[in-house]
Amino acid sequence: MEMVKNNQTMDFPPDFSCPISLELMKDPVTISTGVTYERKNIEKWLFTYKKKSCPATMLSIDNFDITPNHTLRRLILAWQDSCSQLPPSSPPPSIKHDELMSLLNTIESTPFKVSSLTKLRIIVETSDDVKMDFRNCGGIEMLLRIIVQILVESLDFLTFRACEVSLGVLNQLFQSEEDETLLKLLSKPECMKSMSIMLQRGSADARVYTISIFQKMVRAEYNWDFFIHDQGVDFFKSLLELVSDEISTEASTCALQVLIAILGSSKKSRLKVVEAGGVCTLIELLPDSNKSKSEKMMQLIKLLCECPEGRLAFTEHKLSIPVITKKILHVSDTASKIGVKILWLICTFQPTERVLEEMLIFGSVKKLVALLHVDGRSSTKEKLVKMFKLHGSSWRRYSCFPIELKDCLGLVNSS
């Protein structure tokens, strides 16, 4: 079907077109006048519109029989097969073609690549035609050769700077997660390793280029398991530094999305993020975060609290309970649900006396009771009921427990 669709945009023999729609026929049939039509078109003419004439000749017809034209169908299919075997036509060179070729030749032949790469980046961003021309000239492969060169000459300043600028060009070219060709090239182990180095040691701009590329790979559902296996704590520290970046909010958002993708697919990486200070960083950034970032940060905290080390780091931070509590019923339904999951994990697996007391003092219990009154059954509500059944009697013993909540806890315990 896709081949037929593509062929309809091409010139085809006039005998292959339906006289009604003038489009390439898929199911040609012949009527009593000897004229062939696309089946659905002639059936609509005769049986939906109740016409009694031939659309092409306008002759009256009494016999409404429709006969498949197998010979014509075979000819159409043979023509489509021959078209599919033709090599695709290359787009015409862009108006910047000569300048592109000159720069590519210079870059390939000199160790001093940075100035030419900088010019190249300016040219490539002018139009989509220039981007396509650059790709057709083997530009992407050249950039990747420059990027992986730092694996051999990582201490060479010129090589390092050339890698940084090359990443800027690649980031411009990687416009969509549907770009499977570029995604496949970037996913090669040596290229991923080079980008990891750049994320940790590159300039501010280079780190933004790299995290932007990583974000597009997240959207393309790249499998991070193999790559993350070889990454140490320093890699995650670099991601957390970008999360904390107040100057580049775009880089911060990208880093959050990359971390969510990595932690969601690799449980082993969660311990590395905890060791990198992830729980502390996220808790301290959360109070001043907007809705979108709050949801992402809370999702990360939830993922980290699914491992014992993450829960321990959470309970040891003095701001964790009050910060999460404040976000519940204050940001969004999504944030509230995630907040409940975080507290449920802590109440179930790390219910120290200090944690239970802080949940009461900082209003967590009061907000959880409020959420209990939301209509309908849900996994969130089940977690709320379990928390109160586990710790309701402990909370009631505190002198600061609100009297108006005692009846509610009684109802929960009796259910």
Image: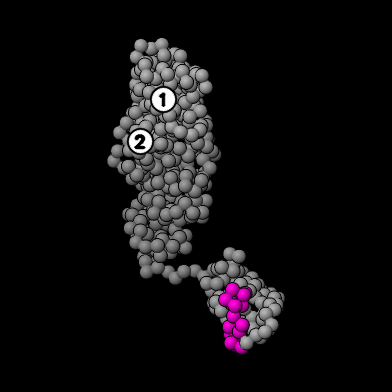
Q: Nearer the viewer, residue 125 or 20?
A: 20
**What residue did someone put label 2 on?**
331
Q: Is residue 246 above or below residue 45?
A: above
The x and y percentages for residue 389 are 49, 19
Q: Residues within 10 Å of mark 1 (few under 14, many from 20)?
A: some
Q: Is residue 186 above or below residue 332?
A: below
Q: Nearer the viewer, residue 253 or 359?
A: 359
Which segment is the magenta one?
A: 41-59
Quadrant showing the N terminus? bottom right
| Kind of element beneath mark 2 | loop
The x and y percentages for residue 287 are 32, 31
Q: Is residue 141 left or right of residue 364?
A: right
The colour scheme applied to this rendered structure is one colour
Residue 305 can be seen, yes or no: no
**What residue did someone put label 1 on?**
369
The answer to which image quadrant residue 319 occupies is top left
